[in-house]
Image (spheres, rainbow, N blue to C red):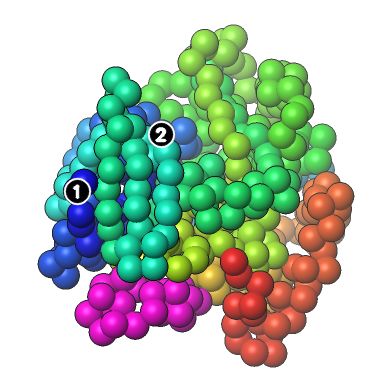
Amino acid sequence: MRNVDVIIVGASLAAAAAAKRLVDAGFETLILERLELPRHKICSGILSPRGYRFLLENFGPLPRAALHDPTWCRGVTFHFPSMVSMPMDFFGGTTPHLHRKYSDYWAIQRSGAEVHDQTSVVALSDKGTHVAVSARRQGGETVEYGARYVIGADGPSSVVRKAIYPQYDKQIPWFFVGQKFHDIIHCPLDHEYFHFWFHPRLGHYTWSHARDGRQIVGVGFKKGDSFHDRHRIVEAYLREKHDVQLQPAAPDHEGCAENFGPSLINRYVFGRGNMLLTGQSTGFLNMIGEGMSCALHSGAIAGEAVVESLCHNQPVQSVYRQMIASEVRRTSDQWNPLMIAFAKPHEADFPAALLALPREDRIKVLRDIWRFVVLYKEFNWGRQIMASSLARLFTGRYPPQRWL
């Protein structure tokens, strides 16, 4: 059996950030990854300015191999059914378009942690003094590990979360997020922007942008609907309404399951005992679906919490939950209607862009946003969102009692 201070499950950006903190503090850290590295990662790749600053400050300048083409994104453009469009530049300037296969691998290497790839975690058991981890290497060999702490940085379908809360995945709504790639005939959408549609007929999450000479057409919808049918609807809409002329989709489409709920309703999952969760396994997701910056910052906080616990013999869960409250505020503020109306929780100035529109267009946009929000009515999130928003207004924080 191999014994280390900390095992991190998943070779993600969250894992790299956590590992960097732990290795720098002198703790033996091992990352387990089920795929061979560098591994493919489903992601549009548009990083927020905040996430970019984190990478620069902690890992250094990005290598060219870690970027798609176009290499930079200027901002985001919101499109509405009324045919009003609102381009908004990021406050922090242009931001990189990450090629996740290579950017994640680069960050993992820069963290200094030891990595065992092609190693799938199959069981975890918290023994109180340590966590026993059983894994299986490619070829079927079983490997046993022991760690004082385990950090789950393995995304929305986290095996660590399933070990802690086996029923959790059955109690929440899941969405399917998929993207197809098209060669471009004619596309008037500005390639310097990430394009997002607030349109209930198109689905719960619809986007498009240029990547490596092709156009991504992405759709998000309730799990169980047809990806191909949804994609055809969006493709036809872009052609009819925006004159986007594309070749038929290439065969290399991709998709994954996501849960948008925790960040909206302050129902994060941070772990139990000696096992912590971070990144998207907790539910962190920014409003435009960008989870990389949340992953980096929450991963670093998870690493810092473990360092604090190991150095000062403090219970790691209480330390982590105190420290992670700042990232909860940052992320949930982006979904908070009161913060959106009266503050600037995003990295682009939505209120200024809205006020710059003619009065008639402002009315159209607000009406369109309301009709889009109603799409989520079936999940009964409205009261929970307002309760969390009011708690934030009067106490300055989101209630930690709702976290798992």
Identify the residue shown where x is 48% and y is 76%. Answer: 321
Majority secondary structure in the magenta region: helix
Locate residue 241 relative to residue 120 in the image: left or right.
Answer: right
Local SS, label 2: loop
| Amino acid type, residue under disc 2 in the picture | Lys
What span is in magenta? 304-325
Q: Quadrant of the C terminus?
A: bottom right
- How far across and down, in percent of the image, does residue 218 sit? 60, 31
Locate residue 316 relative to residue 106 in the image: left or right.
Answer: right
Q: In this view of the protein, can residue 155 be seen by the observer?
A: no
Identify the residue shown where x is 71% and y is 75%. Answer: 388
- Quote the CA–CA distance across marks 1 and 2: 28 Å
In the displayed structure, 402 sits above or below 34; it is: below
Local SS, label 1: strand
Upstream in the sequence, badge 1 or badge 2?
Answer: 1
| Amino acid type, residue under disc 1 in the picture | Arg
- How far across and down, in percent of the image, does residue 314 sit? 34, 83
Q: In this view of the protein, can residue 271 be seen by the observer?
A: yes
Q: Which residue is mark 2?
A: 41
Q: Residue furthest bottom?
A: 394
